[in-house]
């Protein structure tokens, strides 16, 4: 191992691997340090059930924001499959099915739910608007940041003033109430603003709007695709690209400190503890922090104690293996219902009630959640024998489960949250989910649950926040104190850059901030 590298990447998640691949391809010597005994961060696959040959995407599930440009530039052998059905929302003995390939069927489903065509037509107009915004904004995500005024002109000139106001200036709740009449339709749209974001849809901070925007602009379409082979196939391809370009990856390396180096000095210093407990150190021309900003602050010597504005995740993640799909009360095709996103108790009223209870310190009585079935699109994550059966994997993302609910008594709160969430799911099914849960080699149900506190411990997400902190707008905001630089990755230290979800334009499985950090290094005059 060298005593000095041009680039030291702290964290081997998918963004760290992306940064390493680009920097190494640009001729820089690169060292990646990863705390776990494997790379991938939250973008990994695992066999969580004893004796069961099923590789589930354990933390991150779907891909939308990974630009085609990154896949092409790095030559990633990654296959993403489009899901035909966008969503299904059970309501009493019926439901709302959104079929992206059959407008007639979708119109009929809206009419059965709402009694008219008005919300179907409003749905078409609303998402045509977001699609055009996506088409214009997506290409800018892999370029240097544009100022807010330029992005505003881009949106207003091409889509209209109303689009800018609806997405960037007015609280999402106001927009949805004005656009749709039906409470369920409003809720289905609202969830894209609440994934990984603990917020009221009417918050004046508009963090729900920022979350919504990132959920509808990926690759210019907003589609959320299934990674063939599981999420581990994505991080594995990035690892291979980094290694092929010449990067050195060291796992079981717990970084303990980063010294940013004096201005004009020879470099920054990075210290870590290896698998044998020995202290190691190296000099770096640049340190790319592919970890959360809160973790970087700690490594730079800041106070490790959480503050009032410390990031807080707000989701319950449940992975399951089923012997077959559960029966629904509706006569909808189960393949259609479970292939897309199945919304559970996510009308706008239900979402607001759950948020209010969680904000008051209670686990919601009827937790909202959404689930999807990877194996209906890609059965390669199952071993041959299991794939030949009716077995299906189910991943559930529970909303409005903030970390604060799990701090005092993590185990008891986890059990309570799981019971409430499964009861909520059972309320929209024709049979209990327990009746179709597969059993592992020890006879235990194939069910794995993770709270924000678990994600903080296992993956290093501060407060379990899947975006590392609240998402930022995808443009420069110098008037608002933005000092993130032309690529949105700068810190107060010239040799230290953000390279993960906490950077501007971070969040989701995208590689965008990792690439941006590498671009900043390759264009830097700091040696």
Image (spheres, rainbow, N blue to C red):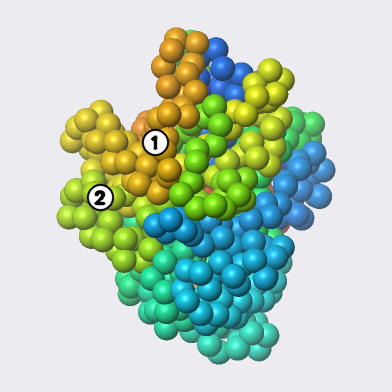
Question: How far across and how far down the image is residue 334, in percent?
Answer: 58, 46
Residue nearest the viewer, comparing 328 with 412: 328
The answer to whether residue 349 is left or right of residue 51 is: left
Q: First in sequence, mark 1 or 2: give its number.
A: 2
Instruction: Please give the residue where the numbered disc 1 appears in the rendered image.
Output: 432
* Quadrant assignment for the N terminus: top right
| Disc on res. 88 | none
Identity of the residue drawn at 42% across and 22% down:
445
Task: Check if mark 1's residue and mark 2's residue have beta carbons within 8 Å.
Answer: no
Viewer-closest of 344 and 69: 344
Looking at the rendered structure, the secondary structure element under dot 2 is loop
Q: Nearer the viewer, residue 349 or 81?
A: 349
Residue 464 in the figure: left or right of residue 274: left
Tell me which corner region of the image, top left, top right, bottom left or bottom right, holds residue 391: top right
Q: CA distance from mark 1 to mark 2?
A: 20 Å
**305 sits left or right of 280 in the view:** left
Viewer can see residue 354: yes
**Residue at (60%, 24%) from the top-left corner?**
54
Which SS class for mark 1?
Answer: loop
| Residue under the point 53% across and 87% down | 162
Evaluate whether residue 300 shows in this view: no
**Residue 441 vertical placement versus 504 (above, below):** above
Task: Tally the marks.
Answer: 2
Query: Mark 2 highlights which residue?
Result: 364
Q: Residue at x 18, y 35 (%)?
A: 408
Q: Residues within 10 Å of mark 2 (few under 14, many from 20)?
A: many
Find residue 382 and report its image quarter: top right
Judge by depth and name the residue closer to the eye, 378 or 215. 378
């Amino acid at each position: 191992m060298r005593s000095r590298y041009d680039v030291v990447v702290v964290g081997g998640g998918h963004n760290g691997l992306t940064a390493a691949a680009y920097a190494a391809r640009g001729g820089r010597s690169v060292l990646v340090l990863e705390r776990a005994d494997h790379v991938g961060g939250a973008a990994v696959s695992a066999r969580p059930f004893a004796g069961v040959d099923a590789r589930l995407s354990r933390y991150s599930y779907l891909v939308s924001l990974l630009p085609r440009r990154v896949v092409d530039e790095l030559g990633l052998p990654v296959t993403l499959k489009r899901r035909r059905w966008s969503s299904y929302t059970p309501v009493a003995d019926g439901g709302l099915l959104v079929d992206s390939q059959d407008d007639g069927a979708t119109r009929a489903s809206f009419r059965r739910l709402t009694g008219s065509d008005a919300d179907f037509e409003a749905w078409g107009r609303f998402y045509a608007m977001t699609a055009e915004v996506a088409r214009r904004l997506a290409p800018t995500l892999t370029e240097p940041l544009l100022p807010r005024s330029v992005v505003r002109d881009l949106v207003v000139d091409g889509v209209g003033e109303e689009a800018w106001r609806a997405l960037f200036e007015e609280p999402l709740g106001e927009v949805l109430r004005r656009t749709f009449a039906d409470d369920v339709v409003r809720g289905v749209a609202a969830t894209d603003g609440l994934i990984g974001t603990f917020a009221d849809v009417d918050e004046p901070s508009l963090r729900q709007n920022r979350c919504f925007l990132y959920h509808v602009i990926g690759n210019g379409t907003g589609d959320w695709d299934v990674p063939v082979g599981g999420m581990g196939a994505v991080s594995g391809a990035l690892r291979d690209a980094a290694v092929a370009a010449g990067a050195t990856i060291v796992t079981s390396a717990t970084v303990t400190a980063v010294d940013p180096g004096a201005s004009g000095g020879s470099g920054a210093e990075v210290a870590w503890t290896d698998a044998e407990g020995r202290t190691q150190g190296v000099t770096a021309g640049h340190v790319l922090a592919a970890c959360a900003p809160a973790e970087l602050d700690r490594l730079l010597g800041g106070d490790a104690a959480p503050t009032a504005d410390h990031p807080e995740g707000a989701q319950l993640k449940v992975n399951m293996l089923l012997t077959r799909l559960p029966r629904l009360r509706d006569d909808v095709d189960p393949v259609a219902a479970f292939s897309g996103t199945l919304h559970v108790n996510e009308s706008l009223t239900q979402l607001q009630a759950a948020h209010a209870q969680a904000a008051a310190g209670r686990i919601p009585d009827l937790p909202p959640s959404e689930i999807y079935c990877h194996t209906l699109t890609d059965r390669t994550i199952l071993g041959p024998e299991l794939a030949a059966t009716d077995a299906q994997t189910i991943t559930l993302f529970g909303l409005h489960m903030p970390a604060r609910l799990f701090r005092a008594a993590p185990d008891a709160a986890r059990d309570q949250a799981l019971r409430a969430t499964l009861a909520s799911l059972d309320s929209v099914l024709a049979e209990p989910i327990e009746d179709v849960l597969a059993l592992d080699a020890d006879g235990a149900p194939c069910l794995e649950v993770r709270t924000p506190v678990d994600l903080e411990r296992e993956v290093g997400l501060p407060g379990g926040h899947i975006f590392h902190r609240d998402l930022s707008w995808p443009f420069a905001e110098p008037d608002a104190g933005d000092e993130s630089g032309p690529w949105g990755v700068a810190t107060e230290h010239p040799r230290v850059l953000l390279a993960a979800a906490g950077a501007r334009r971070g969040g989701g499985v995208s590689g965008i901030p990792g690439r941006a950090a590498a671009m900043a290094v390759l264009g830097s005059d700091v040696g």
